[in-house]
Amino acid sequence: MIGLIDGLALPLMRMLDPERAHRLALAGMKLLPARAIVEDERFAVAAFGLKFPNPLGLAAGLDKNAEAVDATFRLGFGFAEIGTVTPRPQAGNARPRLFRLDADQAVVNRLGFNNDGAEAASARLAARAGHGGIVGVNIGANRDSPDRGADYVALVTAFAPFASYLTVNVSSPNTPGLRDLQQASALDELLARVLAARDTAAKSAAKTARPIPVLIKIAPDLTLADLDDLVGVARRRAIDGMIVGNTTTSRPPTLRDIRAYEQGGLSGRPLFSLSTRMLAETFVRVEGRFPLIGVGGIDSGAAAFAKIKAGATLIQLYTGLVFRGLRLVGEIKSDLVNFLRLGRYDALSDAVGVDAAAMTAEPWPG
Ligand SMILES: Cc1cc2nc3c(=O)[nH]c(=O)nc-3n(C[C@H](O)[C@H](O)[C@H](O)COP(=O)(O)O)c2cc1C
C-alpha cells in the first residue's frame, strides 16, 4: 500500500506547488490502513524514561496541528513530534514560503510557525489519547508575543496532560529573534520558567505523575563557543534531552538549485554533514548526561546509522520523505538491521556515539 501511494503520488507531488503537496501528503497518510507492525527487538530504545519501539521519529513541522498522529505510527515511525504549536493560532509568513530544491534533494522554508494554536492541537491529542504511541509536542512563541517565556510556560501547562515529551523550540530561523533564546543567559531564564511550569503541572496531576521530559531543539548554526555555553546551561538545569537540530540559515557551496537563494531554513541532504558534525560536537560536550535526537538530512539507512554513531540515541526525519516517499521509513529500518549485523552490535544503543570523538577531531567540514 505504501509502495502504491508512493508510486502514484511522488511524480504528481513534484508537479504541485510545495504547500499543496504538503497538504496532500498529510491527507494521503491519513488514508493508510491500520496494520500490525512487528519491530526488531534490537531497535528498542529507552530514553527520557520512555520506551521507544524503534528510534526513528517524524520530525516537527510535517504534522504541525496533530492531524495525522495515528498515521505516523502506521507508517512505522517509533515516535511522532507534532508542532511547532504556538499558544494562539498564527497564519505564518506571506506565500510563497516553501521551496523544493529538486537538484539538491533539499527544501527551504520560511513558514513562520503557521499553525492552528494550542487549543486545537490539544483537543486533537485528547481525542486520540487512548491510542498509544510516543507523541512529543514541539512548542514555540507567537511572533507578536510581548513575553515569549510566558508563551512557553502556557504551552507546557496546556500540553503536559497529552504529550509524552515537550520540545522547547528555540531554533526556528523564521520567527525574528527566536534564536536569541539560545544565548546562555536567555536560555537559563527560559529553562527555569519552563521547568518550574513542568513541575507544577506534574504536582497538580495524579500523585504518581512523573514530570514530563523537556527537550530543547537547537540550531546547527551555533558557534562551538556558543555550544559550550548552551550545553553548560542545559546540564546545570538538568534538561532531559536535546534535538540537534533545526534547519540551517547557511547555504553550502555545493547547492545547485536557484531556489537555494530564497530566505529561510534549509533542510534535506545538504544539511546532513553540518548537522551530523554539530551532533557529534554536542555529544562530546554532554558526556552522557542526557540523550540526543539527531535530525538533518537523513534519507537512507546509511545516513541514519551515521547519525547514531555520531551520538544520536534517537533520530528524526522530514525532508527525506519529500524526495524518497513514505517507503523510506521501512527502508531505513531494514538497512539498520543489516548495519547491526555487519558491525556485530547486539542493539542500536551499543552504536550510539562510537564515532563522535573521531569526528570532532576532524577539520570543520567546508
Ligand atoms: C517545511 C518544514 C517545516 C518545518 N517546521 C518545523 C517546525 O515547525 N518546528 C521545528 O522544530 N522544526 C521544523 N522543521 C525542521 C525539521 O523538524 C527538521 O529539524 C529539519 O527539517 C531537518 O531535518 P530533515 O533534513 O530531515 O528535514 C521544518 C522543516 C521543514 C522542511
Image (cartoon, rainbow, N blue to C red):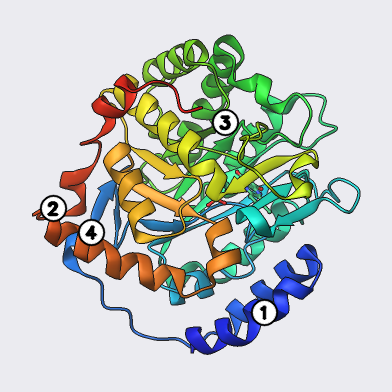
Evaluate whether residue 288 shows in this view.
no
Instruction: Please tell me how crowded label 4 is: few (under 14), some (14-19), or many (20+) other residues with Cα within 10 Å.
Output: some
- Percent across and percent down for residue 124 are 63, 66
- What is the x, y in percent for residue 69? 54, 68
Residue neighbourhood size for the residue with mark 3, other residues' Cα within 10 Å, grouped as few (<14), some (14–19), many (≥20) = many
The image shows residue 148 at horizontal and vertical percentages of 72, 27
Q: Earlier in the sequence, mark 2 or mark 1?
A: 1
State yes or no: Cβ of the residue under disc 1 lies below 8 Å from any atom of ligand 1.
Answer: no
Instruction: Tell me the crowding category of disc 1: few under 14, some 14 to 19, or many 20 or more residues within 10 angstroms, Cα based.
Output: few
Q: Earlier in the sequence, mark 3 or mark 2?
A: 3
The image quarter in which residue 233 lies: top left
Q: Mark 3 sits on what residue?
A: 219
Q: Amino acid at mark 2?
A: Gly
Tell me what residue is drawn at x 41 percent, y 40 percent: 213
The location of residue 156, given as percent across then percent down, is: 58, 40
Residue sitting at the far right: 94
| Badge 2 vs badge 4, beta-carbon distance below 8 Å | no
Frontmost residue, 150 versus 113: 113
Question: Alpha carbon of mark 1 to alpha carbon of mark 4: how far?
Answer: 35 Å
* Residue 17 in view, yes or no: yes
Residue linked to disc 2: 343
Q: Amino acid at mark 1?
A: Pro
Label located before the other in sequence (1 or 4): 1
What's the amino acid at mark 4?
Ala
Residue carrying label 4: 44
- Kindly identify the residue that appears in the image at 44 percent across and 29 percent down: 278
Q: Which mark is residue 229?
A: none
Label 2 neighbourhood size at 10 Å, few (<14), some (14-19), many (20+)?
few
